[in-house]
Every structure is written in structure tokens, then in C-alpha cells.
């Protein structure tokens, strides 16, 4: 076991120690931007890999393997001699003692970057998690894939029509990008990939319902793009329901104000909550638990502590910097630059978010997006989406593997990773808390 | 849930019902060979996919993703209209009632093919399973990968030299093909893939020990090939110990007759035991629990019940037909032919195993094999190994993905699937029973 002593900055190094908690986009871009800075960088993450979140829904829908969208953090940073990586879980921060408490030890810092992101939340209905797994980790994705595929397998052997219908009804709660992407992928698999494989059931009759509590899908998008997305989903066969507030979730049904949808398959894409570490800083938080930061992404009264990425609440011209990958990357590079300026005795600057545009894919050759004020939808938007995601995916190997599997899926209309794993012999969708099953 | 009624042969079909339990090589080749036979085929498997066992060790050693070596059974057989696939676990067989009892139902048959294979065994020391996971399922492979990679991560943060040594010592028990392949792959990763990624430790100093109780590795191979394999492993840096009988296994050490090897990483590649279903047939079993079958692979007094693949004990010219993939494939096709002959009123034949040769890979450009009396080793044997495994891998997509990843690994000396999954936040090699973690 790592000893519990306060890890000192490595012997002989009088360089300031920069501790980065979280190896997502923000943390990784920050570490890289400190490549040539006279500092000692330690990246902490409870996972050994950087996960390309934007494609996680494709793992959940059997298109990609977890290994295709993840890379070991220490391998990404292997050439950066001033950086070390620790597989460790940060439990809390003592901003006065300038120390991070770990699950199994402690580590001191001169500069701290907190980029632990957000997880999914159930609006105070944590009990819903059992029946309606969310999508944030590889384990979540494999659990969703398991339930999705298992429903068809179980239906194939189900004699009772009502029970069969329940098994072939899939409800996605939440009409944001994740919900839209899940619904689009699931309807395609049901309508295009599976039909020939079954005998007793026709997977194409599966009912895919997308529930959004608000008045439109993709609330953060321009209205006309929301309409386009709804239109494209409907064309694919998704039953889109806006203004549909979920009041109750049971293992075999979703309840709306005055309606009940019988289903054995409920997936959660609705709420997010800031990771718990943010609250231990003692800084002001917004309603979602995000840390309200200064214009330079630092914490009030603690210029040596930065909070970046989805965990940061930063307003600019009255607008919140969105919780998207490009914002996290920009913040990561920005705070690295602020640290370098400190060391050079230069004043700090205010962070400026450069909007790279927004993009959501809906399905085969269907997407919506906006770049530089220009709106795209359908095929052109989809091509941009493909290009951008390959571009930001880390690692040559992963890029090649993902491109090949996308091409294969496009031409064969099949999905390549249709594995039900984790529970040998289990032949029914079980409803206990999503268990950890992943690769 | 599937109802508990005895599933009848589908309405309107007066065709004999052939039930195949197990979608491995034997079961799959049997089902395919019945493509045009006037029968109704039902393939039962507790997993929804066919697993290409020969490459499972590459999942355990981070070279391939589970999805690359598995294909959904129902997709493989999608064009075979006389076949249906059930995700179901067979619990026992009532050979007199001609019925298979499932975990959740029953199914009657006119012909039954049992091809459920073998699992790993601990020679009556089942308690060893916790400290020394074996390699038979995807879950096993991901668990081995998790422990292997986690050991280096934990060592990187371990201050105590003795504890660090223990973490960087890997012991593989069993010098058969699986043990040889695991040891060869692990030493390559430690020596070639990981070194640049770590700061506090030098992964190249990891100690990889391969223990074989017998007098030589690959006992079923010609002696000179065993010697070659040992020589090639030693050159790679594996510590090969023959005549090394394991007397005790503890979470932190392996015990031999008069020696103890301190290690936190023990992997089991020693014994196999027949799957439990075989014993429920009431047929004579051999010491390993295999079913002793007639020359036509049928069970004594029950010509309508066949046992094939690793689960079958069949002697030919005083030699046991080996438990290898080619034998299972041949038996599968053979029993399908016997069923067709029955239906045509023709007499049965005796199964003849055609030896396709033997092959074991040791590492980069190293392998041993024998075909048609010719012995190969080193580079030529390795090339044959590559070719044969790509050839028998099912699915165009999988072939392409595996070839690309092999090429990438060959040229970069890296491993592409270095994911520690299943236990977010776990930062130490835990020693409870290998939990289910898979993709």
C-alpha cells in the first residue's frame, strides 16, 4: 500500500508541485501545456485511462469497444518527463494545508487543478438509479449495452405478448445530447441491425421512447435545430415526447403526470451533478454543485487552486461557459498559462471561452450543429461530426480502429460489439443497482 | 420470463428437433452442418456470443478487446432458417424423458448434442480461485488484465521495496499452452510496452515466473518442441521452473515443496475440469469428468445423445482425441452427418480425428508447432500461428480488427487495451474471488 506519509516533491526538485485531479480533457490539456514549465506535475485519477466521453454512447450501443475510446493517461504523457501519474482517488482538499486527501494517502501541492467533472443525478430520486442506469463511465455503458441486448434475447423466449411488449419498449429519460444520441442509435439497431437475427420476435417492432421534460430537445441549441433533431429522430422511428415530466420510475414502468409507460428498459440521460470533490473546497457552489470560480478559473481567496471543466461555474457576458469538451480543453491550457505567468511574475488574465460550435449526432447520416453562427443539419452536420470526433480522439490506434468500425457499421448496418457480459447464465433483465461490468 | 412449459417443436413442423447445448466450436460447426437437413435446430448457450478461446489470453494481456474475439451466435447463424438460438443455461438432462432442464424452463429434443466444454479446476483446492484466477471466460480475461495492470500502478506508488517486489512478481501456474502464452505476453509487456510510462518503478525489472509441475512445458508436444519453447521463453526473460509442484497458494505468496515465492499476482493455467452438465447424463465419466462416448460420439444406450468437443472422452488407437478446437469442429460436423444418415436410414460411422497439427505461440515472432510430422519453431511457426488464427476467427470485422491491432502491436511494441475496469477508485490489487468484470 502507498504509505500515508505526505508525499514530498521528489528529492532534488525545488520546482513547484502542480497537482491535477482528474485526467479528463481539462486535466490532460493542462498537464500537456505545462510540458516545458519549471514545475513538477502529478496527475491523479481513479481510473488509469483517459475516457473520450463523447463516444461513450457508442459503447453503450454496441458500436465500439471500451478500449477504442480510452487511453492510459500515463501512456499519453509518457514523454513528459516533468509529469508523473498516480492511480488514486481524491477524497477531499484541505485548501489551507495545501494538501489533497486520498483514499489511501495524502499529497501536498503548490498549485492544485480540480477537474473531476460531473456525474449523473436523479433529482433527489437516487432510488431510480437501480431501474434507470445513467451513462458516465465505461461500467455504465457496458451495463446499458447489457440491458439493451438482453431485452431482445429475453423477448425471443417470452411467450406472453404483454411481457414481450414490455421487454421491447425502451425509454430514454432526458432529451439532451446523450438522450438524443442513445435514442437514435437504439432505434437503428432495432430496425436495421437485429431483425434477421431473431425468429420469434421482430426487433423492428421495438418501441423507442425519448422523454424530455422541457418544451424541446437539445435545450441548449437554437430552436430550429431542436426542431430538426426531433424531426430526424421521428423519421428514424423514435417516439419523441417533450413536456413529459417523469414522476416515478419502477422496474417495469415509467410514470408521467397522467400516464404510465410499461417497460423493462429505462435509461437515464437527464440530470448531472458536480463531482463531490468540489464541495470539499469550501468555495461557493451553484445549484448543481459546481464551483463558482473567479474570471481566471481560480477559487476565491485561493489563487493557487483552479477549478476547470464541467465542475467549474464561470459566467461570461452573463452566460455560463458550457460544460463541453472544448471549454474544458481551453480552461486546461489557460490555467497552465496562468501558472507559467505566476512563475514569471506576470499578472493573471481572465479566461475567454472561444465557442467552437455545438454538435449532436442523431443517427446514420443525421446530426445537427452550429459553427461560427452557421447552422447545419442532416448529412453535412453528420460528416462534420465524424471528422471532429476522429480529430479529438486520442491515439493513432484508436482513430484507425474507430474509423474502420464506423465504416463497417455504415455499410453493413451492423453493430460489432454485441456482447452481453458480466452475468453468465443471467437470462433476464435484472433490476438491482447497475453493477460494475466493464472492459 | 420464459414460461416453464415444455417448449414444443414449432407448430406445423414435424421435423425432428435437434438441441445443441453450447455455442463453441463443436456446437457451432454442428449447427452449420445441419443447415440443409430436414430438422429444427435449437442452439442453447448461456452467453449470447461465440468466443474464440484461442485468443482469450490476448484479452487478458491487453492486446485485444473482448469484442474482437466474440460474435453473437444468432448473428453467425442468422441465415440458417432452420435454426433458432436461445440465451439459456442448461442445468441437467433427462435422457429418458428426452428433455433438457434449463435454469428457467425446459426443452424437449429428438437429438441432443452436448458441447459445453471444460472449465478450469484447482485440483480440489477451490479456495485458490480467489488468489489465482484462471482463464476460461471473458470475465476471467478482464480480471487477469485488471490485476496485471493494477500491479504496476500500485507499485508506482509503493514506497516499501519488498512490497514493491511482491507487486512486480507475476507467477503463472501451469506450463501448458495457456501458461506459455500468458507468460510470453506478460514479459513482453513488462519489458517493451510499459517502461517509458512509469517514473518511480522500472517495469522491465518485473519478475515473470512460469511454474510447471511436470518435467517439461507443453507436455502434449514433442520433447524437442518443449525444449524450444522453454529456450524461447527464457530468452524473453521468463523464469521457467519445471518439476515445480505448487503445494499452497496465499494472497501474497506461492508455496512449492521447499520454497516460497512472494507475489501479489498469481494466475492459474493448470487444470481443467469437465463442465457439470456432462455428469447429469448418467454416462460413464473419466477422471476429469469427461463423458466416455462411443466411436460415433454418442452416449452408451442413447444414440440420440451426442457429446462432442472438450467434454467428450474418445480414444482412437489407444490415444485420446485431444481437447483442441479442430477436434471439436470435426466432431461437430461429424455428428451432424450422423443425424442426416439416421434420417436417411443409413448406418452410423466411427469418428476419425484428422490431426491438423499443434501450435503454441510464445511471443513476438516466437512459437512452436508441428504439422504433418514437420516441426516448426521461432519465426516460421509464428507466421503459421498468425495465419491459422486469423483464418479460424469468425467474422470479417473481427479478422480486420485483429490484424490491424497485431500489426500495430508488432511495430510499436505497445498494447492497445490497457484498461483497468470494474472497480473505480480501487488502487490496490484486491484478492477476493475474481469478480465479474467484462466487456
Image (tube, coloured by chain):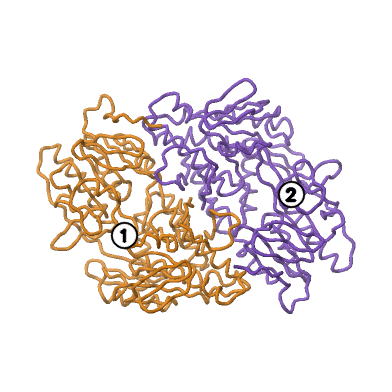
Chain colours: A purple, B orange
Q: Any mark on residue A321, and which?
A: none
The quarter of the picture where residue A420 lies is top left
Residue B127: where, in percent of width, then height? 40, 60
Q: Chain of mark 2?
A: A
Q: Is residue A408 left or right of residue A82?
A: left
Placement of the N terminus of chain A among the 4 image quadrants? bottom right
Q: CA distance from mark 1 to mark 2?
A: 50 Å
Q: Are marks 1 and 2 on the same chain?
A: no
Q: Residue furthest top?
A: A258
Write the residue at 71% across / 75% down. A10
Q: Nearer the viewer, residue B195 or A414?
A: B195
Q: State whether residue A146 is above or below residue B194.
A: above
Q: Which residue is mark 2?
A: A311
Q: Any mark on residue B272, and which?
A: 1
Q: State whether residue B198 is above or below residue A425.
A: below
Write the residue at 65% across / 42% down. A120
Q: State whether residue B316 is above or below residue B306.
A: below
Residue B106: where, in percent of width, then height? 30, 35
Mark 1 against mark 2, which lies toward the viewer? 1
Amino acid at each position: 500500500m502507498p504509505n500515508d506519509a505526505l508525499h514530498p516533491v521528489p528529492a532534488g526538485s525545488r520546482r513547484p508541485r502542480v497537482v491535477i485531479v482528474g485526467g479528463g480533457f481539462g486535466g490532460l490539456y493542462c498537464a500537456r501545456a505545462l510540458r516545458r514549465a519549471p514545475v513538477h506535475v502529478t496527475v491523479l485519477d481513479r481510473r488509469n485511462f483517459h475516457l473520450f466521453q463523447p463516444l461513450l454512447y457508442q459503447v453503450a450501443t454496441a458500436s465500439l469497444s471500451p478500449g477504442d475510446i480510452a487511453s492510459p493517461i500515463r501512456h499519453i504523457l509518457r514523454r513528459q518527463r516533468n509529469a508523473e501519474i498516480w492511480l488514486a482517488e481524491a477524497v477531499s482538499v484541505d485548501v489551507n494545508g495545501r494538501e489533497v486527501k486520498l483514499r489511501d494517502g495524502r499529497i501536498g501541492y503548490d498549485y492544485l487543478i480540480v477537474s473531476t467533472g460531473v456525474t449523473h443525478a436523479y433529482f433527489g430520486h437516487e432510488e431510480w438509479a437501480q431501474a434507470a442506469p445513467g451513462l458516465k463511465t465505461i461500467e455504465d455503458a457496458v451495463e446499458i449495452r447489457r440491458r439493451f441486448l438482453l431485452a431482445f434475447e429475453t423477448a425471443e423466449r417470452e411467450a406472453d405478448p404483454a411481457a414481450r411488449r414490455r421487454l421491447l419498449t425502451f425509454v430514454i429519460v432526458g432529451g439532451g445530447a446523450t438522450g438524443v444520441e442513445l435514442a437514435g442509435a437504439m432505434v437503428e439497431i432495432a430496425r436495421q441491425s437485429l431483425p434477421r437475427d431473431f425468429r420469434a420476435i421482430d426487433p423492428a417492432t421495438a418501441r423507442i421512447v425519448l422523454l424530455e421534460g422541457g418544451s424541446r430537445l437539445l435545450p441548449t441549441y437554437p430552436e430550429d435545430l431542436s426542431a430538426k433533431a426531433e424531426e430526424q429522430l421521428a423519421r428514424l422511428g423514435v417516439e419523441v415526447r417533450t413536456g413529459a415530466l417523469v414522476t416515478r420510475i419502477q422496474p417495469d414502468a415509467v410514470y408521467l403526470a397522467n400516464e404510465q409507460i410499461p417497460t423493462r428498459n429505462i435509461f437515464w440521460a437527464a440530470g448531472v451533478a458536480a463531482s463531490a470533490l468540489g464541495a470539499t473546497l469550501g468555495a461557493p457552489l451553484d445549484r448543481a454543485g459546481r464551483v463558482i470560480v473567479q474570471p481566471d478559473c481560480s477559487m476565491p481567496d485561493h489563487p493557487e487552486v483552479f477549478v476547470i471543466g464541467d465542475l467549474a461555474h464561470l459566467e461570461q457576458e452573463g452566460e455560463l461557459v458550457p460544460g463541453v469538451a472544448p471549454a474544458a480543453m481551453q480552461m486546461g491550457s489557460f490555467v497552465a498559462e496562468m501558472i507559467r505567468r505566476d512563475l514569471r511574475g506576470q499578472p493573471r488574465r481572465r479566461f475567454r471561452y472561444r465557442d467552437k460550435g455545438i454538435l449532436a449526432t442523431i443517427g446514420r447520416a443525421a446530426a445537427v450543429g452550429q459553427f461560427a453562427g452557421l447552422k447545419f443539419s442532416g448529412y453535412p452536420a453528420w460528416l462534420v461530426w465524424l471528422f471532429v470526433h476522429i480529430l479529438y480522439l486520442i491515439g493513432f490506434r484508436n482513430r484507425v480502429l474507430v474509423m474502420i468500425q464506423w465504416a463497417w457499421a455504415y455499410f453493413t448496418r451492423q453493430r460489432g460489439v454485441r456482447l452481453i457480459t458480466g452475468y453468465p447464465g443471467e437470462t433476464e433483465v435484472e433490476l438491482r443497482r447497475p453493477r460494475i461490468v466493464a472492459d
